Image (cartoon, rainbow, N blue to C red):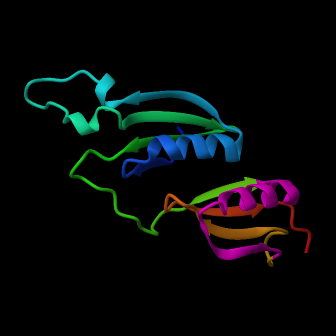
Amino acid sequence: MQFIPYLQLNGNAREAIGFYEKVFHAENLGVITFGEMPTTPDFPFPENAKDLISHASLRVGESVLMFSDTFPGQPAQEGNLVTICVTFDNADKAHQIFEALQDGGQVEMPLSETGFSPAYGVIKDKFGVTFQIYTEGYQG
């Protein structure tokens, strides 16, 4: 069994995939657009949806992130119920990823030493996705 974060974005999934590929040095496992999906007369895709992402996957280290754009007329709503915790065993790598996520994003808690981690911080990226950057190995 695996838990895989699935990000639904409002028309900018392709941009997010490229961003995360660069930030996390991720491997693109495949992208399917709505236009590449089989259609039926009962459920035709609108023209403006054909280039939107229906499903995509990135391998990030030992994990996978999945993506899609929302279907036109069914927008995703930003929330704070779920965040993605990215865990490192190296504070330098944590700092590098935290800095990269700041491109167009907003720091919610600066990356710093805490009582439970040598480098922990929270950032909402330019797509509205909140990441907790956590470093293991606190010896305090």
Q: Is residue 105 left or right of residue 128?
A: right
Q: Residue furthest right?
A: 139
Q: Is residue 123 above or below residue 53?
A: below
| Residue depicted at x 53% and y 47% | 16
Which one is nearer the viewer's eye here, 7 or 103? 103
| Residue depicted at x 24% and y 47% | 72
Residue 103: quarter of image: bottom right
92 drawn magenta: yes
| Residue depicted at x 40% and y 49% | 8
Estimate the x, y position of residue 58 in percent, counting from the top left: 57, 36
103 drawn magenta: yes
| Residue depicted at x 67% and y 76% | 109
Q: Quadrant of the C terminus?
A: bottom right
Q: Is residue 116 left or right of residue 55?
A: right
Q: Is residue 39 above or below residue 134?
A: above
Q: Is residue 117 above or below residue 17?
A: below
Estimate the x, y position of residue 94 in percent, counting from the top left: 79, 58
Which one is nearer the viewer's eye here, 24 or 80? 24
**In this view of the protein, can residue 4 be seen by the observer?**
no
Estimate the x, y position of residue 44 in percent, counting from the top left: 14, 30
The residue stretch that appears in magenta: 88-113
Q: Residue furthest left?
A: 42
Which one is nearer the viewer's eye here, 117 or 10? 10
Counting labels gives: 0
Q: Is residue 113 above or below residue 101?
A: below
Q: Residue furthest front?
A: 48
